[in-house]
Image (cartoon, rainbow, N blue to C red):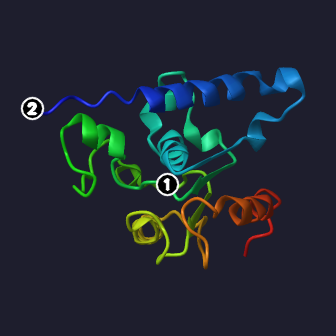
Amino acid sequence: MLLRPRPTCTRDAVAAVAWTLRNIADYGGDPRRIYVSGHSAGGYLTSMVGLDTTYLGEFGLHPDSLAGLIPFSGHTITHFTPRQERGLQWNDIVVDRYAPIQHLRPGAPPLLLITGDRERELFGRYEENAYFWRMLRLSGQERTWLYELEGFDHGNMVVPATLLTLDFVRGRLP
């Protein structure tokens, strides 16, 4: 039996971003300088928040108002949870409306894709992100970077990824 995916986690993440966009100025922040980042499942959510326009659209907002997206080793195909809800195995490849790669569009916020070493990463995550990067570029999204952190696995790639994130936010990437 196939269940209809319930992307509650995506809606929760989008609600947090929408709240931030609407309220950051009240706390002295600049709504034009909002970056979204997350690791693994959080990386998936990062991409969905910034690429699928329907989620923020439900709040009367558009993801193009975000300054950038920084998914750390995120899924670019449909995440494990919606696949599991459908009774699919971890290695069943699904590209549907719950897949970030389904929402390629020029003009999206800049993206910094970071993964661990392709030989140490989780379930081909580097290759998934490399393909995503290539398709983003071919779709007209020129402000996209991909970094593979050699020697780092899925879990320990976060610290060096944070250093790249700071360079991205400061405009120091080529």
103 over 60 or under it: above or below: below
130 or 24, nearer to the observer: 130
Residue occupying image coordinates x 46% and y 33%: 10
Can you tell which mark lies on residue 161?
none
Q: CA distance from mark 2 to mark 1?
A: 27 Å
* Residue 28 picture quarter: top right
Q: Tag 1: Cα neighbours inside 10 Å, few (<14), some, or many (≥20)?
A: many
Q: Which mark is residue 1?
A: 2
Residue 98, quarter of the rendered image: top left
Question: Where the C terminus falls, by quadrant?
Answer: bottom right
30 to 77, vertically: above or below: above
Q: Is residue 87 left or right of residue 35?
A: left
Instruction: Name the foreground residue: 140 vs 118.
Output: 118
* Residue at image mark 1: 74
Q: Earlier in the sequence, mark 2 or mark 1?
A: 2
What amino acid is found at the position of numbered circle 2 in the picture? Met
| SS label for mark 1 | loop
Foreground disc of the pair 2, 1: 2
Residue at the location (41% across, 72% down)?
Answer: 127
In x, y percent, where is residue 84? 26, 40
Q: Residues within 10 Å of mark 2 (few under 14, many from 20)?
A: few
Q: Residue at x 40, y 66 (%)?
A: 128
Residue 126 horizontal side relative to residue 146, left or right: left
- Residue 51 image point, x, y percent: 48, 46
Describe the element under mark 2 as helix, strand or loop.
loop
Q: Quadrant of the N terminus?
A: top left
The three-letter code of the residue at mark 1 reads Gly
